[in-house]
Image (cartoon, grey):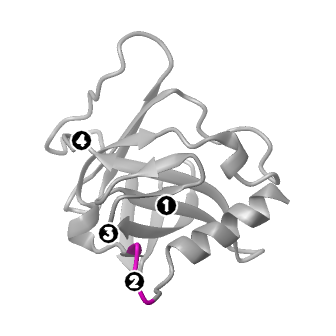
Amino acid sequence: MYFARTLLMIGLIFSGNAFGQKAIPASWTDIVGRWSVVPVPQELQSSNVGKSLWPASCQFISFYDDGYLVHQQSEFGECRNQIPQERTDGFDTVTWSLENGFMKIVRSDYKMTELWKVDRVNTNTHLDTLNLNEGDMLMQLIDTKARKSMWLRVLRREGS
């Protein structure tokens, strides 16, 4: 029930209204760069998933302009981004593409594809207890069979 209410809140907060849109589909230039993953309270996630899909407390993602991405996660030690600024050899198993606000992530090492709805936050706002800053990115993992959001990820550009 709480998850259904949260999805309704996402829809209401981030849909167009008389006061303008709080988020719009992200463009390629919105996405390219280095991001930290903002922890999303478990109660804002789908109850169908159960536990966190990516439980590490320290996570970073870099989207490279050539269509590759790197995701770093760690639980121990200092939490700092160790992903290279520029893509280097060896970081070539995960690619991303974007069309109409939907990102397709393909992992060649595991033969899997993920579909994400990606929106850029246009103004400081909040989703329940989660503060969102202008420029943050909302990524909703889509269950393509059920045609619904199954996981919410919030990214904040490094240095902002």
Q: Please indicate whether residue 126 sits to the left or right of residue 95 in the image.
A: right
Report, in whole angstroms, how far the alpha carbon at label 2 lies from the one at label 4: 29 Å
Where in the figure is residue 146, as x and y percent of width and height?
A: 78, 74
Report, in whole angstroms, how far the alpha carbon at label 2 lies from the one at label 3: 12 Å
Q: Sequence-wise, which precedes: disc 1 or disc 4?
A: 1
Of the two numbered discs 2 and 4 in the rendering, the one whose residue sits closer to the viewer: 2
Q: Sequence-wise, which precedes: disc 3 or disc 1?
A: 3
Report, in whole angstroms, how far the alpha carbon at label 2 lies from the one at label 1: 23 Å
Say which element carries label 2.
loop
Where in the figure is residue 11, as x and y percent of width and height?
A: 60, 75
Say which element carries label 3.
loop
Mark 2, residues whose alpha carbon is within 10 Å: few (<14), some, or many (≥20)? few
Report, in whole angstroms, how far the alpha carbon at label 3 lies from the one at label 1: 14 Å
Of the two numbered discs 2 and 3 in the rendering, the one whose residue sits closer to the viewer: 2
72 or 36: nearer the eye? Answer: 36
Of the two numbered discs 2 and 1 in the rendering, the one whose residue sits closer to the viewer: 2
Where in the figure is residue 5, as x and y percent of width and height?
A: 75, 65
Residue 92 seen from this side = no
Q: Is residue 22 magenta?
A: yes
The residue pinned by badge 2 equals: 19
The residue pinned by badge 1 equals: 139
Report, in whole angstroms, how far the alpha carbon at label 1 lies from the one at label 4: 16 Å
101 or 136: nearer the eye? Answer: 136
Question: Which label was assigned to residue 158?
Answer: 4
